[in-house]
Image: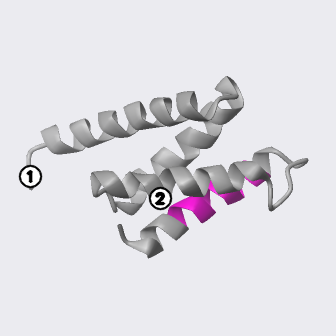
Amino acid sequence: MNSQAREGACAFAWRNYLLLHSGIGENDSRRAALYRYITNLRDTGEDDFDLLQIAAVTYLKKMDELHDDQCARLAADQILAGCLEARNSQPER
């Protein structure tokens, strides 16, 4: 996985998360959990910046909704899989 894409996707998602949650600190444990989740996506070989951003934002949103890391990972993985399927089903130009 391209570390620049990983870092950028995490930074993008975290900045936006902080904008929506003013009481959260820069070093909140959710930031480390986000980084771990995005880093674990390397097993899929995914390094598309846009898709990593979607996965990162979805993960943080689902963490807030579900209050469970495993459930948030599963939900974000399902969204990512849907995005990959849609991208792969489009004809090449």
Give the alpha-carbon distance from disc 2 to disc 1, as whole Å.
29 Å
Residue that extends furthest to the top in the rendered view of this protein: 66
Residue 44 location (% of width, % of height): 29, 51
Left or right of residue 13: residue 78? left
For image coordinates 47% across by 59% down, the residue present is 39
When the figure is inspected, residue 54 is found, relative to residue 82, above or below; the finding is below
- The residue tagged with tag 1: helix, strand or loop? loop
Q: Which residue is mark 2?
A: 39
Q: Which residue is mark 1?
A: 92
When the figure is inspected, residue 4 is found, relative to residue 25, above or below; the finding is below
For image coordinates 86% across by 56% down, the residue present is 25
76 magenta-colored: no
- Amino acid beneath label 2: Thr
For image coordinates 14% across by 38% down, the residue present is 89
User: Which mark is first along the chain, 1 or 2?
Assistant: 2
Q: Main secondary structure of the magenta part?
A: helix
Identify which residue, 93 or 32, lies in the foreground.
32
Point out the image quarter for the C terminus.
bottom left
Residue that extends furthest to the left in the rendered view of this protein: 92
Please state which of the two labelled residues, at mark 2 or mark 1, is closer to the viewer: 2
For image coordinates 77% across by 45% down, the residue present is 20
Residue 6 location (% of width, % of height): 47, 65
Residue 43 location (% of width, % of height): 32, 54
Q: Which residues are magenta?
A: 8-18
Crowd class of label 1 (few under 14; some 14 to 19; many from 20; radius 10 Å) = few
Q: Quadrant of residue 80?
A: top left
Residue 21 location (% of width, % of height): 82, 45
